[in-house]
Image (tube, helix red, strand yellow):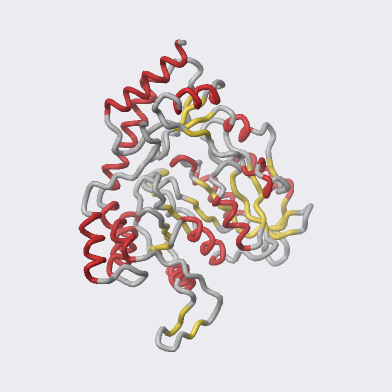
C-alpha cells in the first residue's frame, strides 16, 4: 500500500533522541526544547516561539491569550480539521462558521465582510457584537487549509476595522507564504502542528508563534502550569501541562533542518500530479493564487466520482482519504451559526479526496498513483 502522508525520518533524528536518552533529559526540560523554539523563530522571523504537546493545545492556549472568554463567539471557516473548532469549545465559546471559496477552499472573505457589515456592530466599549444573539465576537481564526492561503491583506484589513484579533491556524501550512510573509506570522498569534502526517513531524507536537513578546511570555507561563517558582511550586493562575517534551523536540530540531527540502518535494509532487491528471475525467484541483506559495501539504483532487475512486484506490494499493466533513455537519457543531449562500463546503466535501504525497514517495510510486487513477476513469 502506498501511504497517504507519512513522516520522513532520514537525518539526525535518531542521534538526537539517543542523546536525550543517554543524558536522561527526555521530559519537558532539556536543551532541545529551547533549540527547537529558537530555530523555529529564526526560520519564520518572529519574536518568539513556544512549543506545545500538539497543535490543538497550541490553539487552546492562543485563544486564551487573545482574551476569548466563555460564551464568546469566534469566527472560523466551516472546512477544517475538527481540532480548530474543538479548541474554541475548550474555552466555552462557540464557533461562527463561514463557508469557503469554491476555488481555493479558504474562508470566503466577501461572505465574511457582508456578515460583519450586516449582522454585527461594535458597542461603546469597542467590542464586536453579533446583533441577533447579543454575544461578543472576540476573535477570528483563519485556517490555511491544505497549506493554501486566502488574501491575507484583505482579511487583516477587515479584522482591523472590526477590532478582531486574528489567530492563524497554520497547522498545515508551515513554509507556505502570502506575498513573502510566512503563514502563521501575519496575525496576532500563529499555531502549527507536528503530527505524523505534517510536512515536518515530531510524532506529536505543536508550536505557538507571535511577534508580540507579551503573548510569547504568556504562552510559556500557561503551558508550564503557570508556575512562578519551581522551588516552592507557587502557581499564580490556572495553567496547563502543555509543554513539548525534550525527546520530541530533539526530533523537531532534525526535521526543521530539512523543511525547505521537504517543501520543495511537496511542490514537485503536486506539480507532477497536476500535469498528469489535468484533463483526466472531471478531475479538478485546489486553486493557488499567484501571490501565494503553498507548501502543497496534502495533495487533493476533486471529482463527482469521489466515493467510487476512493474505494478503487484503497482496494488497489493506493491509500486515499476523503476531505474533512464540514463542521456544520458534525453533531456537536450543527447548531452553530453557519454563514453561507451556496454551501460550497458540502459541494467540495462530496467531491474531494487526498492522494499519496509523502515527502519520501518515489517517482515510481507517483507514477503508479497516476496510472491507477487513469485506469479508473478509462474503465
- Residue 155, percent from left and from top: 55, 47
- Residue 151, percent from left and from top: 50, 41
The image quadrant of residue 207 is bottom left
Between residue 205 and residue 318, name the one nearer to us.
318
Viewed as shown, does residue 212 lie left or right of 128? Answer: left
Task: Give the residue displayed 31% in from the left and 32% down from the top.
Answer: 268
User: Hey, which residue is sitting farthest bottom in the picture?
Assistant: 232
- Inspect this view and state whether residue 35 appears: yes
User: Hey, which residue is sitting farthest top in the picture?
Assistant: 379
Q: Is residue 119 above or below residue 139?
A: above
Q: Is residue 10 above or below residue 59?
A: above
Between residue 74 and residue 197, name the one nearer to us.
197
Task: Give the residue displayed 53% in from the left and 39% down from the top.
Answer: 106
The image quadrant of residue 292 is top left
Task: Give the residue displayed 59% in from the left and 45% down from the top.
Answer: 77
Viewed as shown, does residue 126 lie left or right of 6? Answer: right
- Residue 357, percent from left and from top: 37, 34
- Inspect this view and state whether residue 293 appears: no
**In this figure, what is the number of numbered marks?**
0
Between residue 118 and residue 25, name the one nearer to us.
25
- Residue 66, percent from left and from top: 55, 64
Q: Is residue 16 above or below residue 25?
A: above
Between residue 309 and residue 224, name the one nearer to us.
309
Q: Quadrant of the N terminus?
A: top left
Task: Give the residue displayed 34% in from the left and 72% down from the top.
Answer: 29
Amino acid at each position: 500500500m502506498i501511504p497517504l502522508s507519512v513522516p520522513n525520518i532520514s537525518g539526525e533524528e535518531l542521534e538526537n533522541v539517543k542523546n536525550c536518552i543517554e543524558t536522561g533529559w527526555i521530559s519537558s526540560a532539556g536543551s532541545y526544547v529551547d533549540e527547537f523554539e529558537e530555530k523555529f523563530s529564526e526560520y519564520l522571523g518572529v519574536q518568539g516561539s513556544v512549543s506545545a504537546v500538539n497543535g490543538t493545545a497550541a490553539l487552546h492556549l492562543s485563544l486564551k491569550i487573545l482574551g476569548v472568554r466563555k460564551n464568546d463567539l469566534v469566527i472560523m471557516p466551516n472546512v477544517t480539521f475538527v481540532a480548530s473548532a474543538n479548541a474554541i469549545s475548550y474555552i466555552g465559546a462557540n464557533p461562527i462558521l463561514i463557508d469557503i471559496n469554491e476555488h481555493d477552499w479558504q474562508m470566503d472573505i466577501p461572505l465574511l465582510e457582508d456578515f460583519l457589515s450586516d449582522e454585527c456592530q461594535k458597542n461603546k466599549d469597542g467590542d464586536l457584537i453579533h446583533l441577533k444573539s447579543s454575544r461578543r465576537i472576540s476573535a477570528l481564526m483563519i485556517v490555511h487549509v491544505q497549506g493554501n492561503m486566502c488574501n491575507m491583506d484583505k482579511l487583516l484589513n477587515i479584522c482591523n476595522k472590526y477590532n478582531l484579533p486574528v489567530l492563524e491556524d497554520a497547522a498545515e501550512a508551515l513554509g507556505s507564504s502570502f506575498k513573502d510573509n510566512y503563514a502563521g506570522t501575519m496575525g496576532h498569534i500563529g499555531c502549527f502542528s507536528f503530527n505524523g502526517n505534517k510536512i515536518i513531524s515530531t510524532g506529536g507536537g505543536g508550536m505557538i508563534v507571535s511577534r508580540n513578546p507579551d503573548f510569547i511570555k504568556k504562552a510559556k507561563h500557561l503551558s508550564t502550569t503557570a508556575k512562578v517558582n519551581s522551588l516552592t511550586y507557587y502557581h499564580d493562575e490556572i495553567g496547563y501541562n502543555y509543554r513539548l517534551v525534550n525527546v520530541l523536540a530533539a526530533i523537531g530540531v532534525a526535521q526543521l533542518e530539512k523543511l525547505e527540502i521537504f517543501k520543495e518535494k511537496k511542490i514537485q509532487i503536486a506539480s507532477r500530479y497536476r500535469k498528469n491528471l489535468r484533463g483526466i475525467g472531471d478531475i479538478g484541483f485546489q486553486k493557488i493564487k499567484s501571490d501565494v506559495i503553498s507548501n502543497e501539504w496534502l495533495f487533493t483532487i476533486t471529482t463527482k466520482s469521489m466515493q467510487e475512486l476512493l474505494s478503487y484506490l484503497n482496494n488497489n494499493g493506493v491509500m486515499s482519504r476523503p476531505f474533512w466533513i464540514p463542521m456544520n455537519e458534525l453533531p456537536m457543531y450543527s447548531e452553530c451559526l453557519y454563514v453561507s449562500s451556496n454551501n460550497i463546503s458540502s459541494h467540495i466535501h462530496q467531491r474531494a479526496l487526498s492522494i499519496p504525497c509523502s515527502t519520501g514517495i518515489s517517482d515510481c510510486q507517483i507514477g503508479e498513483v497516476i496510472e491507477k487513477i487513469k485506469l479508473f476513469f478509462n474503465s
